[in-house]
Amino acid sequence: MKILAKTLGANIRAKRKEMGISQDGLALECGVDRSYMGRIERGEVNITVEKLYQIASKLGCNPASLLP
Amino acid sequence: MKILAKTLGANIRAKRKEMGISQDGLALECGVDRSYMGRIERGEVNITVEKLYQIASKLGCNPASLLP
DNA sequence: GAAAAATACGGATTATAATCCGTGGTTATA
DNA sequence: TATAACCACGGATTATAATCCGTATTTTTC
């Protein structure tokens, strides 16, 4: 369950694929652990607002646009 | 410093005052600790997306609208 | 200007976000 | 078909979000 994290993760994944970069690549750019980025996209974790901003920044999009 | 948490907290405070409820009251409704709600508004802490949603829900607004 | 309500702030503890490293499986690419 | 790039998933540890008190201070209200 955890619909919030699940859809947030899906949104991040979609944006990332749009940019044509790998999970590891994005993780590296954002300065987050590669395995953690996987968990984020799978919706297994509940990230902080700070992390949301880091990721959105590297994805070149508005943080709000990633939220369900 | 920590501009992100500071402005997020200020936004939450503004919305709360708009509704005319107390910090403790909002904390109680959201199911978060009263002292923690104070720290949030003062921008001393980095909250999770889940908390952001809980708070926005009780403030009757969109989570994205609370973000800087 | 005193009493009450609301907020600031702190220390100590608990829950959990985030890291680090490893391995196995799946999907491109040569 | 093998080699590499990409992803899923895990256990163990560290950093920090969130809780649970308590008290002092500010702001409202009478």
Image (cartoon, coloured by chain):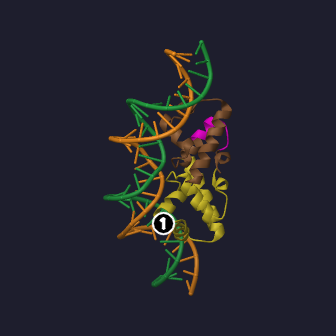
Chain colours: A brown, B yellow, C green, D orange
SS at circle 1: helix
**Quadrant assignment, res B18:** bottom right
Question: Crowding near pointer 1: few (<14 within 10 Å), some, many (20+)?
Answer: some
Expressed as whole percent of the image width and height from the top left, the position of residue A54 reads 57, 40
Q: Which is nearer the eye, B52 or C29?
A: C29
Residue at mark 1: B34
Q: Residue at x 56, y 52 (%)?
A: B49
Q: What amino acid is found at the position of numbered circle 1 in the picture?
A: Arg
Q: Residue at x 52, y 57 (%)?
A: B40
Q: Main secondary structure of the magenta part?
A: helix
- Queried whether the magenta region covers residue B34, the answer comes back as no
Expressed as whole percent of the image width and height from the top left, the position of residue A12 reads 62, 41
- Queried whether the magenta region covers residue A57, the answer comes back as yes
Above or below: residue A27 compared with residue D24 = above
Expressed as whole percent of the image width and height from the top left, the position of residue A22 reads 58, 30
Q: Which is nearer the eye, B64 or D30?
A: B64
Q: Residue at x 55, y 43 (%)?
A: A42
> Is residue A14 visible to the viewer in this orientation of the structure?
yes
Q: Which is nearer the eye, A47 or D1?
A: D1
Q: In screen coordinates, is B40 left or right of D14?
A: right
Chain of the residue displaying label 1:
B
Q: Which residues are magenta?
A: A54-62
> Is residue A33 visible to the viewer in this orientation of the structure?
no
- Total labels drawn: 1
Expressed as whole percent of the image width and height from the top left, the position of residue D18 reads 47, 58
Q: Residue at x 54, y 65 (%)?
A: B30
